[in-house]
Image (spheres, rainbow, N blue to C red):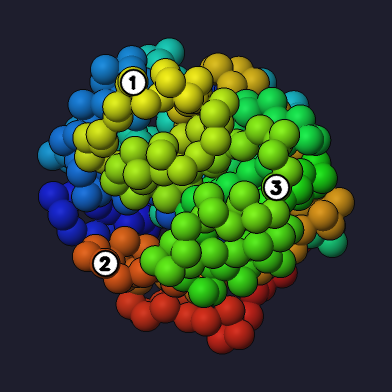
Amino acid sequence: MKAVSYLKGQFSVKEFPELHPNKDQLLVEPLAIGICGSDLSAVEHTDHFLESVKKAGSIGQAFNPDKDLVLGHEFTAKVIEVGENVTDYAPGDLIVALPWVIGDNGVPYTVGYSNEYPGGLSERVLLGNGGHYKIPEGINPYHAAVTEPLATGYNSVLRSEIAKDGGAIVTGAGTVGLGAVIALATRGIHPIIVSDPSSKRREIAQKYGAHVVVNPLEQNPVEIYQQHASGSQRLFVFEASGVKNLIHNMIDFVPHYTKFLVIGASMQDNLINPTSLINKNISMDFITGPGYGETSYVALGETFKDLVDGKFDPSEIITAYAGFEGVGQVFTELRPGGNKKIDQVKILILPHLSGKVLYSPSQVNLPNPF
């Protein structure tokens, strides 16, 4: 089978051994695969990424950088074979995949960060038995691939415990930040201020429920928030940009009792002045993924339900498509470096597309997998 290998700074399409499910596994064919911010970090800051996951005890994410790695942990797929103990899924089912599998050694792995268990950038993938959401007819199974990354932002809103009288600033309108916007909007939070230098991302944020959008290179989002919020509202800042020292630079402007929910991973050390935080009674939570602990994926389920119920249009977030040969270009587009703003939001990889180019949504015909 073909898959996209990442090895020592290079992406290439290679042949890999065929996969066969054991009695507790599903064999699936990915339909659409997204690139996560953690994938960007794993590629650009490999040593730091591996050090952090090892310190956290996340054995299932600790890949060997000297061996082929097939990334991809946010994807939709078609089930093609199941093990004898699998009863909730059958060949032909279309699913939003929960990216986990238990190896034959009994160790749980995150699919996409294991050298032994290829991720979604592959023609076939092994998954664990449970946690996947079946995609009903009438829902585009390609667009549904945005569920998992949106759920990370959604999870930050659940973890914030924001009440209806709270107000919000979302810094960074990538997929995760937009997930926070959707969750805030569906809860009736007002105001929702979204800050991002990209006009395209700000436009999508407004479609998803932001009341005001701000270019932080031109305006201070906290000052704009204060123009639209009442003095009694508690401010919740959902930091989804990963911009170095952004929180440090906001501290002097935010009101007392502000709560920061940090969901944008900066791979650099950031300044923190404890005295400033203490004097303002500021609190912080750090959040990863759509789960709370190891077993609860409430945010993933609620995001998928909102998608199925039509509370937001998932296609709005998809700004381009690419095939396996274009994966290297996708990484370049999503993190170009320097001061250049990133206009792309979610680029989906479709295995059937060819070439190294990016395709606009209008250029792609999505085959019917039902």
Q: Earlier in the sequence, mark 2 or mark 1?
A: 1
Residue at numbered disc 3: 229
SS label for mark 1: helix
Q: Amino acid at mark 2?
A: Asn
**Vertical arrangement, residue 133 with respect to residue 24, above or below:** below
Residue at numbered disc 1: 275
Q: Within 10 Å of the Cα at label 3, are there few (<14), some (14-19), or many (20+) other Cα atoms?
A: some
Image point 29% across, 46% down: which residue? 244
Horizontal arrangement in the rendering, residue 337 relative to residue 211 (left or right): left
For this rendering, which residue is in front, 27 or 270? Answer: 270
* Residue 203: image location, x then y, percent: 61, 71
Q: Earlier in the sequence, mark 3 or mark 2?
A: 3
* Residue 88: image location, x then y, percent: 76, 30
The disc placed on residue 339 is 2
Cα separation, mark 3 vs mark 2, equals 31 Å
SS label for mark 3: loop
Q: Report if residue 50 is visible in the image.
A: yes
